[in-house]
Image (tube, helix red, strand yellow):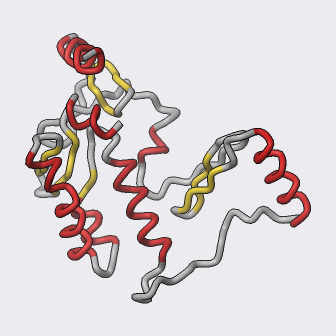
Amino acid sequence: FMYKYASGYLRSRGYEHYEISSYARIGTKGVAEGCQQSKNRSQHNQIYWEIGSDWYAVGLGATSSIDGKRFPRPRQMADYLSWIKGQQEKGTPSWLPEPSVDADGDEVEDTDFLCDTIMTRLRTADGLSLDWIKNAFKDGERRVSAVLQGAELALSLNMAHITEDNDGYRFLRLTDPVGFLFSN
C-alpha cells in the first residue's frame, strides 16, 4: 500500500518515477512517448542503467561491470577476506574469465549479458529497447520473441506494456507502480 501511495503522491506533485526506488522532479526534456525524462535524475547512478557501461566497485558486496560482464564481490566478511587473499596470491585479478560456449555454440556471456540488461533496463521508466535486442545479437529477432514470450503474463496483467517512440523504436516497460512493485 505505501509503495503505491508514495508513487501516486510523488507523481501528482511533479516527480518522475525514473527507477524502481528513485524519483526526480520532472524537467522539460521529453523522451519516448508516455515517458517524460527529468534532467534532475541522480547523475551518479545513471551509469548503472546504461547498456554496456563500465564501472569499478570495491568493497564487501560491491559489483563491477567491465566489458559487459558483472563481477560481484562476496557479501559476507569472512568470504570477502578469503576472496581478497586468493586475489593477492594469484597476482592478477580474476575478473575477466575466458568466454565459455554452451551446447548450441553461443557464448554464455551473450546470454548472461542480455539477461542482465533485461533486468537492469526494466528497473527504469525508460524500459528495455526491443530494437536494441534485435540489432545487438545475430539471432536478435529470436531473442525479442523470447523476451516477449517471457513478458506475456506481465503484459496481460497490465504490469508491463509496449510503447513506441516518435522514431518507431519499441520499448518494453513496467507499469508504475504495479509493475515496478511486483518486480522489486
Give the percent coordinates (x, y) of residue 148: 18, 61
Q: In terms of image quadrants, where is residue 168?
A: bottom left
In the rendered image, the vertical position of residue 61 relative to residue 129, given as above or below: above
Identify which residue is drawn at 24% across, 63% down: 147
In the rendered image, the vertical position of residue 168 relative to residue 112, given as above or below: above
Q: Where the C terminus falls, by quadrant?
A: top left
Give the percent coordinates (x, y) of residue 130: 22, 61
Closest to the observer, 14 or 173: 173
Give the percent coordinates (x, y) of residue 142: 22, 76
Count of labels in the image: 0
Give the percent coordinates (x, y) of residue 49: 42, 45
In the rendered image, the vertical position of residue 86 relative to residue 45, given as above or below: below
Q: In terms of image quadrants, where is residue 58?
A: top right
- Extreme residue in the right direction: 89
- Extreme residue in the left direction: 156
Closest to the observer, 111 or 13: 111
Identify which residue is drawn at 43% across, 56% down: 116
| 49 lies left or right of 164 | right
Identify which residue is drawn at 25% across, 17% down: 1
